[in-house]
Amino acid sequence: MKSYVALAVVFPALVVTAPIHAEEAFLTLTRSAYPRQDLPSSEDVITPADFSTFDTQNAGQAVSRQSGVAVQSYGNQLGSLMTARIRGATSNETLLLIDGRPVAGTSLATQDLSEIPTEQIDHVEIVRGGASALYGPNAMGGVMNVITRRALSGPTGEIGFEAGSFGRETYRANFGSRMGPVDYFLFGDQQNESGFRDNSAARDHNVGGNVGYSMGAGGKLIFDVSSYHSHAGVPGQVFTDIPTNQYDNSLEKQAATPLAQQVTDTNYLRTSYLLPLPMNSLMTLRAFGSQREAAYTNPDPFFPTDNDRHEQSKGGEAQFDLPCGVAVGGNFIRDREDNTDNVTPSNTFIRSIESWGLFAQDTYRYGNLTLIPSGRFDHNSEAGDSKNPRVQLVEDVLPWLRLSGSAARSFRAPTIDDLYYPFTNFGGGFSYQGNPNLRPERAWTYDAGFEVHPDSFSFRATYFLANVTDLIQTTTDPASTTMNIGSARRQGAEIQIDHRVNDYFHDAWNYTYLENRGIPAGYTDYVTLAYSPKHTVNYLATLTPVRDFSLDSMVRYVGSSFTDNDQTGTKLSSTVLWDLRLSYDWRWVKAYIGVNDVTNKRYEVQAGYPLPGRTFFGGITLRFMGRPS
């Protein structure tokens, strides 16, 4: 049953005989199984084997070295917000999914990749370019779909410990198995650290898992649950610009908010029912709900803050995989935000937004040519209706040469904060208020590329273009608000090379060129937009000098950018970072040591949030069940 195994990509615990195996399939491009080896040049799959070559703790760090992807972190300590952008799109224009379902609904905006631990990740699928034709709002830049781990056999289990600079300690464990019709996987971790900056001590933990029950011809039931808790000091943004050449291990460590604390709790529950139907068809029903609470307090005697933000998202989805490559379905999501301001009660508010959508897609194959048209209708209770088509072409011209291209229309719906955040007076004559009359952002995105893949070598190149209208931006006047101002034109190129020289040496690199220009608030012509480095390069070399030992060397270059539009504000200078990691993997034991930022480069990726320079780490993992290496 080919359709049945399509969902095995999301739920690998499904074991059925099919032409496409779960480990070879890619779900996000078509919402059904698509062979990984046939992907367009704009798509990527990232596995633990890829991101274990550097010190990765969460999903944000896992995707941070991919072409076209920029991860912004508000500091390096636990509990710091970590967001991602694809091809110059903002984080609100880049959709984050877990097993195909939005992490933060459609209207909540909080997509924190630091809350997804690596031990939960089976792999991450990245689709670059507009994807609203299948996924609805907020997929203008692209989609990141975190596919969680499932038990494929059993029993298997691991425990691990890692230590690092600034008192970081991490404890991890996971266990999974299959017993007859039942499969399950459980994971947990606990981390704590003293922190690089003042008031950056933090601790957090993740626990969760999934269980599936197969009923033969009656289908399969699957339940997923996860809980994240963080308690962190919040050192705040350093508003006085400190040039990196003046860092002295004192200035950059000072906390702007030495007493601020934030407690974050995120929980989700999902259930799915998969039922095989006649004529090689499949029905999938899903229900899901999540809630996130962030309580921020700062007992500053002059500007006290006591705010409790509570976000909820719940919904359902139905999808039917039909004969001849047809897929149809729809979903409904209700998002609600309760914001309680205990210092200024007038800023307290409760708002909700409902959205629903219907989509359809078909896959046509003519010899070596694959054509995938799709389209979706969405209705948002505040932003109205939206229709978004997409077409994807892939052609294997020769056994070693593939051409691909796509054109798509996509949109970003205003968030609850954009629309309804109440009047806030920041003092000094500056204030902010949401705008309930906002329209959704809209974009047409295009890309064209090719892949050359002879034995032991592959080369991929992609050109991309996005024309964006009705940008939602905050005005620069003292009585600021959000408005649909201006447009943007984002274009560039992505190049990826993977080369396996022999059994002892393998290297890979990717390069992204980005021209991100727009007409923001206060401008009448196109200028370079904020946080838009033109050049980004990642290079990885893996040396295996003797059996069981590996040395990974990662170099990253990021060009300069500015914190404001038209190359104004604080300049973030170009950086070259070098990381090293030595690992030993033998049977039941894996041990590793490493150093990040070998040359002790002092830099920022978000202005006002200094990063620590050179740091060290080391750890050990024991596989106490399952097959040894």
Image (tube, rainbow, N blue to C red):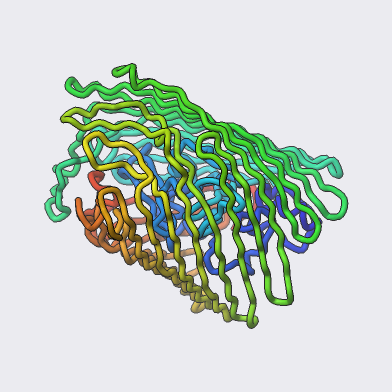
Quadrant for the C terminus in the image: bottom right
* Residue 189 shown left or right of residue 562 in the figure: right
Q: Nearer the viewer, residue 627 or 467?
A: 467
Task: Give the answer, above or below, for where 94 lies relative to 370.
Answer: above
Residue at the image position 67 percent from the left and 61 percent from the top:
34
> x%, y% of residue 511?
39, 69
Q: Nearer the viewer, residue 612 or 37?
A: 37
Q: Nearer the viewer, residue 492 or 201?
A: 492
> x%, y% of residue 424?
29, 27
Q: Nearer the viewer, residue 208 or 621?
A: 208
Residue at the image position 33 percent from the left and 57 percent from the top:
518
* Residue 139 shown left or right of residue 294 in the figure: right
Task: Give the answer, above or below, for where 484 lies relative to 355.
Answer: below
Quadrant for the N terminus in the image: bottom right
Task: Give the answer, above or below, for where 163 lies relative to 236.
Answer: below
> x%, y% of residue 382?
51, 35
Residue at the image position 57 percent from the left and 41 percent from the top:
174
Residue 316 appears in the picture as rendered: yes
